[in-house]
Image (cartoon, rainbow, N blue to C red):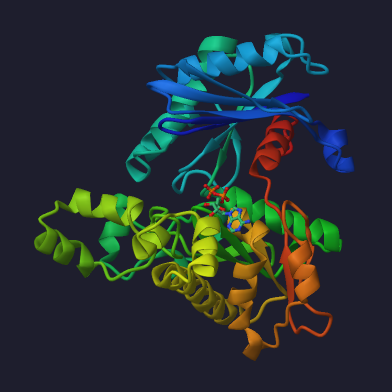
């Protein structure tokens, strides 16, 4: 089957076309056929498309909305000579990344009118993300008709196993009852993929998976996975809570909101925007949200604030690992994923430096080798805990879930 995986944002659309079916999943022989993204939808958009194994094509075009963006993707796919995909009819199903499924969805689902309505009901929990996801689903219906199977794979679903002691905030309980204010957690598809890959390569059953997974990218989160299920995670009601991120502050004293507002003359909304868009690595360094650039600045110009941003980022990760070790009563492995986790041996080394007390020891050679999409163990043989790098692949999991849903296996 050819599955089109879509990740629709407020002004961007990312896609992958993946050939997979039950037999390919079993053999782990799924194949990405094409991928790309459209940025700056709503104006002069930038299109980046590629057939697997070929040079990416970059172009610009005015694209007014998600529907037009999807149309451009479909037309491009049809114009390429991709094996097994001659026209629209060769796309068998679409899998969507949907950000918020609230407490309604603990796993992926095939989309019908009721599901679509429930995703709409979750808009107030994710006002920036769910509307774009819904527009993506509607655009597929417009172009392919209502009969093409569409699946929703939720960022929040994997974390629905959090127990109340981990998901409830210590605020009046009625707020949870009335408005469902609680910690949901995000990046669930990534944490789930990493946990799945870990048990597959180690050939262990799901219930024996006791690991801490670190998704460190522009957005970052950590999950404590015990017996195959998430028991705690760092992101909360929204993706703002937890680790220090590219532009998000992560954890802070909520009293800061009003204090900053009063001092700087900002509304609550403006202050929250500042915490989401101008904080984190960017806010501390005053330079950039890109970890690569910060590492270069720290090394080449010994920039004090770049060093500080890196230090605070790693310190926060270390604190979370420590607290999750207590929450889980110990772990078998710590796994790095995400753009920073998969590519920066330096950041991994800095984080693990603080875990020496635990008996964690990295193997420098292995750590340096595991970059650019390579999977492997990076701890030394005598390390008390195994440290891994497992490149994440949310799109693959979305494609596989779509296939399994179509076959009634979820
Ligand atoms: P997102 O959370 O948006 O999915 P990614 O997981 O793609 O983000 O991670 C993007 C981030 O990964 C970039 O901001 C960059 O800072 C970081 N990154 C990528 N390659 C490297 C590298 N070699 N060294 C350090 N950081 C890197």
Horizontally, residue 371 falls left or right of residue 202, namely left
Q: Is residue 37 above or below residue 191?
A: above
Residue 38 visible, this angle: yes
Give the side of residue 183 with respect to residue 69, left or right.
left
Picture quarter containing residue 353? bottom right
| Residue projecting furthest to the front | 301
Q: Is residue 241 left or right of residue 398?
A: left
Give the mark count.
0
Q: Residue at x 49, y 61 (%)?
A: 294
Residue 212 on image: x %, y % = 63, 69
Could you say where residue 385 lies in the image, as x and y percent from the top left? 73, 79
The C terminus: image quadrant: top right
User: How far from the left and from the top, in percent, is residue 6?
Assistant: 58, 30
**For this rendering, which residue is in front, 338 or 255?**
338
Image quarter of the N terminus = top right
The x and y percentages for residue 102 are 44, 46
Image quadrant where residue 241 sits: bottom left
Answer yes or no: is residue 113 visible: no
> Of 221 and 338, which appears nearest the observer?
338
Q: Nearer the viewer, residue 398 or 281?
A: 281
Instruction: Name the residue rendered at 73%, 75% in the picture.
Output: 332
The residue lying at 81 percent from left, 31 percent from top is 21
Q: Is residue 200 above or below residue 313?
A: above
From the viewer's perspective, tell me whether residue 82 is left or right of residue 299.
Answer: right
When the figure is inspected, residue 93 is found, relative to residue 390, above or below; the finding is above
Give the camera-side residue of 188 and 83.
Answer: 83
Q: Residue drawn 73% across and 51% down?
A: 373
**Residue 123, placed above or below residue 260:** above
């Amino acid at each position: 089957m050819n599955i089109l995986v879509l990740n629709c944002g407020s002004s961007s659309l990312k896609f992958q076309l993946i050939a997979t079916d039950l037999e390919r999943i079993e053999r782990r022989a799924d194949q990405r056929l094409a991928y790309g993204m459209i940025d700056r939808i709503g104006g002069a958009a930038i299109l980046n498309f590629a057939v697997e194994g070929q040079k990416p094509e970059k172009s610009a075009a005015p694209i007014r909305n998600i529907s037009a963006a999807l149309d451009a993707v479909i037309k491009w796919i049809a114009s390429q000579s991709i094996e097994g995909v001659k026209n629209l009819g060769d796309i068998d199903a679409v899998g969507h990344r949907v950000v918020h499924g609230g407490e309604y969805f603990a796993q992926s689902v095939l989309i019908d009118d009721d599901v679509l309505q429930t995703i709409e009901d979750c808009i107030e929990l994710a006002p920036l993300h769910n509307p774009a996801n819904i527009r993506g689903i509607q655009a597929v219906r417009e172009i392919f008709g209502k009969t093409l199977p569409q699946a929703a794979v939720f960022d929040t679903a994997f974390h629905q196993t959090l127990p109340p002691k981990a998901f409830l905030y210590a605020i009046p309980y009625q707020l949870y009852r009335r408005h469902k204010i609680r910690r949901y957690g995000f990046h669930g598809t990534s944490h789930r993929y990493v946990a799945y890959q870990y048990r597959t390569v180690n050939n262990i059953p799901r219930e024996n998976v006791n690991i801490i997974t670190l998704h460190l990218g522009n957005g970052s989160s950590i999950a404590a996975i015990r017996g195959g299920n998430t028991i705690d995670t760092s992101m909360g009601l929204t993706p703002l809570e937890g680790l220090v991120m590219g532009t998000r502050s992560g954890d802070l004293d909520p009293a800061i909101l009003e204090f900053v507002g009063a001092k700087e003359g900002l509304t609550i909304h403006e202050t929250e925007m500042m915490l989401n868009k101008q904080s984190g690595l960017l806010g501390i360094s005053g330079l950039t949200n890109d970890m690569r650039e910060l590492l270069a600045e720290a090394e080449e110009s010994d920039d004090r604030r770049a060093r500080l941003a890196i230090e605070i980022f790693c310190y926060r990760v270390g604190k979370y690992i420590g607290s999750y070790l207590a929450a889980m009563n110990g772990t078998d492995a710590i796994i790095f994923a995400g753009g920073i986790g998969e590519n920066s041996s330096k950041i991994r080394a800095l984080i693990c430096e603080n875990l020496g007390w635990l008996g964690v020891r990295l193997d420098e050679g292995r750590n340096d080798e595991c970059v650019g999409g390579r999977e492997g163990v990076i701890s030394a043989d005598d390390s008390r805990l195994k440290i891994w790098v497992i490149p994440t692949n949310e799109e693959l999991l979305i494609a596989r879930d779509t296939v399994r849903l179509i076959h009634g296996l979820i």
